[in-house]
Image (cartoon, rainbow, N blue to C red):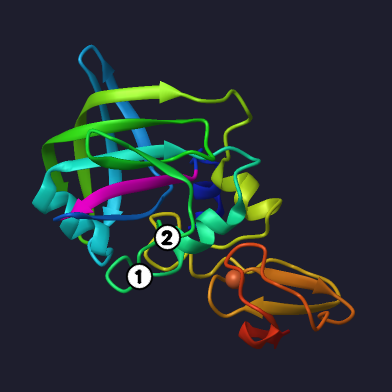
Amino acid sequence: MNNKILRDLTYGVYVVGSLDKDRFVGCIANSVMQITSNPATIAISINHDNYTNKCIKESNKFSVSILNEESNPNIIGTFGFSSSKDIDKYKDISYSVVDNLPVIKDSNGYITCQVISELETETHTIFIGQVLNMDKYDDKMVMTYKFYHEVLKGSSPKKAPTYIEDIVEEIKGNRWKCMICGYIYEGEELPLDFKCPICGQGVEAFEKVN
Ligand code: FE
């Protein structure tokens, strides 16, 4: 089997937000699809191990913010590579509250949903949501998973539906890998003041890889 073909399916990069009682939580999702337009209904796929999964099940609500190519990659670092169980991911992120759900301002817009159905797979829950509200802030190129991977040189955390273990890219020269988010820096030397453009970690988070 050649699983590289899975990279030819199109995926976006989305922030899924939800509620943990009176606290906002969220994570990154690659898989969001529209099911019907009337009534507007969408589906998202969230790993069982994401704290946000549990919070969507308890609150029966979620939001989706649609990131664009100019959205700050730090948003992906914050929401994709740490757990809402441990930190307040919204602390340094500009957001609004719609239907008591957090939505990211630095995006093309948002959709808020009430969960109407759930489907379990071995690793992920597919939540089907009826749209409560939506708005479009901007008309920039939406961030696709391919753009994130190839232009921002980001990787998927193991919990992402798009994570593929045995795809190894061919890269020439030296490279250092961010051990937090998987970002690869290529060059002769890693500058001492380098900060990971995805998750913001300094050089201490990087390890030289072959
Ligand atoms: Fe990083």
Question: Image check: 60 left or right of 133?
Answer: left
Question: Image check: 10 left or right of 124?
Answer: right
How many residues crowd around disc 1 within 10 Å: few (fewer than 14), some, or many (20 or more)? few
Quarter containing the C terminus: bottom right
Label placed on residue 99: none
Instruction: Determine which residue is flagged by label 1.
Output: 87
Secondary structure predominantly adopted by residues drawn in magenta: strand
Quadrant observed for ligand 1 in the rendered image: bottom right
* Label 2 CB-ligand 1 distance < 8 A: no
For label 1, the SS is loop
- Disc 2 or disc 1, which is closer to the eye? 2
Q: Is residue 21 above or below residue 64?
A: below
Task: Tell me where residue 148 appears, x and y as whole percent.
Answer: 61, 50
| Residue drawn where x is 22% and y is 25% of the image | 132
How many residues crowd around disc 2 within 10 Å: few (fewer than 14), some, or many (20 or more)? few
Q: Is residue 169 visible?
A: yes
Task: Tell me where residue 163 appears, x and y as whole percent.
Answer: 45, 61
Q: Is residue 206 above or below residue 145?
A: below
For label 2, the SS is loop
Instruction: Determine which residue is flagged by label 2.
Output: 91
